[in-house]
Image (cartoon, rainbow, N blue to C red):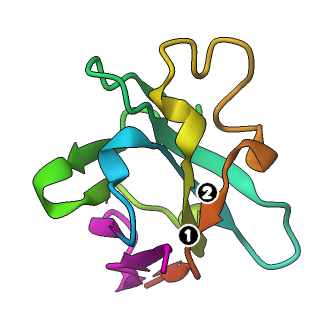
Amino acid sequence: QVQLVESGGGLVQPGGSLRLSCTASGFTLDYYAIGWFRQAPGEEREGVSAISSRSDGRTYYADSVKGRFTISRDNAKNTVYLQMSSLTPEDTAVYYCAADPQGVYPTWGETFSPLEAVNEYEYWGQGTQVTVSS
């Protein structure tokens, strides 16, 4: 059974850090591009970060998180991480990871925005809540 599971969410004070994990079962994650998205109550789903499956591991970040969030892979653990720091209340949302099998192709991300093309992603996790509050 193909499955993505997010973990690592929780309650953190402003300025704090969290590391989210996206672990795959039923398939090998390193052949897939992975995106992180978030959705706050009453808001549309927003692309946060993405990483290609190519050896160059090209990464993408929304302007709102650039310099604060870092996406990375651990293929041995079949897991992609989103390290989040300097968190603000505006980062409060449910965070989802998603996998795109087309990420294996070297042109992935060149003809579309990996943070906007939600429909490119075939598999989605159930989400993990991140709340930034004092």
Percent x, y of residue 48: 57, 47
- Image-quadrant location for residue 10: bottom left
Q: Nearer the viewer, residue 78 or 134?
A: 78
SS of the residue at dot 2? strand
The residue to which callout 2 is attached is 37
Q: Nearer the viewer, residue 95 or 29?
A: 29
Q: Nearer the viewer, residue 68 or 37?
A: 37
Does residue 116 appear to the left or right of 126 in the view shown? right
Residue 130, visible in the rendered structure:
yes
Percent x, y of residue 130: 49, 78
The residue to which callout 1 is attached is 95
Residue visible at 65% across and 47% down?
47
Residue visible at 49% across and 39% down?
50
Does residue 87 appear to the left or right of 85 in the view shown? right
> Most prominent secondary structure in the magenta stretch?
strand
Amino acid at dot 1: Tyr
**Label 2 neighbour load within 10 Å: few <14, some 14-19, many 20+:** many
Residue 12: numbered disc:
none
Amino acid at dot 2: Phe
SS of the residue at dot 1? strand
Q: Nearer the viewer, residue 64 or 96?
A: 96
Does residue 29 appear to the left or right of 94 in the view shown? left
Inter-mark Cα distance, 2 to 1: 6 Å
Residue visible at 48% across and 81% down?
1
Q: Are marks 2 and 1 in contact (CB under 8 Å)?
A: yes
Q: Which residues are magenta?
A: 1-24
Residue visible at 70% across and 26% down?
113
Q: Quadrant of the C terminus?
A: bottom left
